[in-house]
Amino acid sequence: MSEPASVARDLDLSRFLAALDAVAAVTPDDAEFLYDAGTPHGALRRRNLLRYLGLMAEAGPQILLLGEAPGHRGMTVSGVPFTSVREVHTHPGLISGRLEGDGLELPEHPDAPWEASSRVVWSALTSWRGPLPLLWSVYPNHPFVAGDRRTNRAPRAPEVRAGAPVGLELARAFDVRTIAAVGRKAQGALEAAGIAAPALRHPAQGGAALFTRQLAELNERMLAGTLEATSLPERSG
């Protein structure tokens, strides 16, 4: 599949994209594969994702924050992890810091204008020092309550197992030093892969204050050089 040329030239995403596209084949009826280039919204999300990853490659992240799954108000709209319409509109240079903006696209009529978790994450990142952490979800599809795509549900264990290799390939592509789990689903997936990772409270459902504090502590440990490097497992097969 041909991809836009907006990704940093020295970033090889071939294995990541192959793993991501492989998840499409095992998507159940109550989940949505977000990056189908054959649909208008899927193509937009894919362009935004590649644009985001290109900008992050320029920044050189040391940490990957691995969340749970896309929400219908955030990543499902923009294609960018933990990023809703509100973040793109109010902070055009959110990722790069450029006055001209990050070059992200938005649907003409987005299903939702904002997401609480996106607001919390980017609010907490305003005080981050050093390269921004890379963001991703352990299950890259949007899981919803059957019959209503404008809902969210927790990903099931088989879905997490299917999606976890995508995040690991992203970590390999960026050669990040540390993977940190945001929420129990991500933590469990990393433990199942034999990875001991720092764990943060998910910002949803009353977790905003604790997540913000733990993220600041993670940043301090990164700056102090006291974070242990994550050892990724060998690829299966």
Image: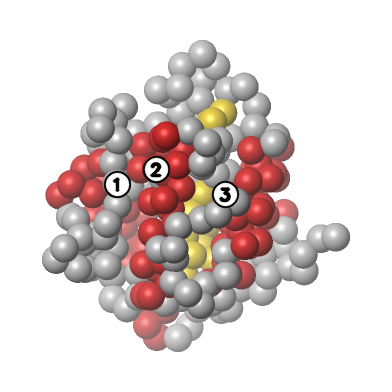
The single residue placed furthest to the front in the displayed view is 2
Residue where numbered disc 3 is placed: 138
On the question of residue 166 being in view, the answer is no
The C terminus appears in which quarter of the rendering?
bottom right
Task: Report how far apart the C-alphas of labels 1 and 3 lie in the structure.
Answer: 24 Å
Residue sitting at x 32%, y 78%: 130
Q: Position of residue 25 (x, y in %)?
A: 69, 36
User: Which label number is shown at residue 105?
Assistant: 1
The answer to the question of whether label 1 and label 2 lie on touching residues, with beta carbons closer than 8 A, is yes
Residue where numbered disc 2 is placed: 44
The nearer-to-camera label among 1 and 3 is: 1
The one of 174 and 17 positioned closer to us in this rendering? 17
Q: Assess disc 1: are there few (<14), some (14-19) or many (≥20) residues with their C-alpha within 10 Å of its C-alpha.
A: some
Q: Amino acid at mark 3?
A: Val
Q: Position of residue 39 (x, y in %)?
A: 48, 33
Q: Amino acid at mark 1?
A: Glu
Mark closer to the chain start, 1 or 2:
2
Position of 6 relative to 30 (above/below):
below
Q: Assess disc 2: are there few (<14), some (14-19) or many (≥20) residues with their C-alpha within 10 Å of its C-alpha.
A: many
Q: Position of residue 117 (x, y in %)?
A: 33, 43
Residue sitting at x 68%, y 45%: 22
Task: Report how far apart the C-alphas of labels 3 and 2 lie in the structure.
Answer: 21 Å
The nearer-to-camera label among 3 and 2 is: 2
On the question of residue 56 being in view, the answer is yes
Q: Is residue 151 left or right of residue 198?
A: left
Q: Is residue 142 left or right of residue 127?
A: right
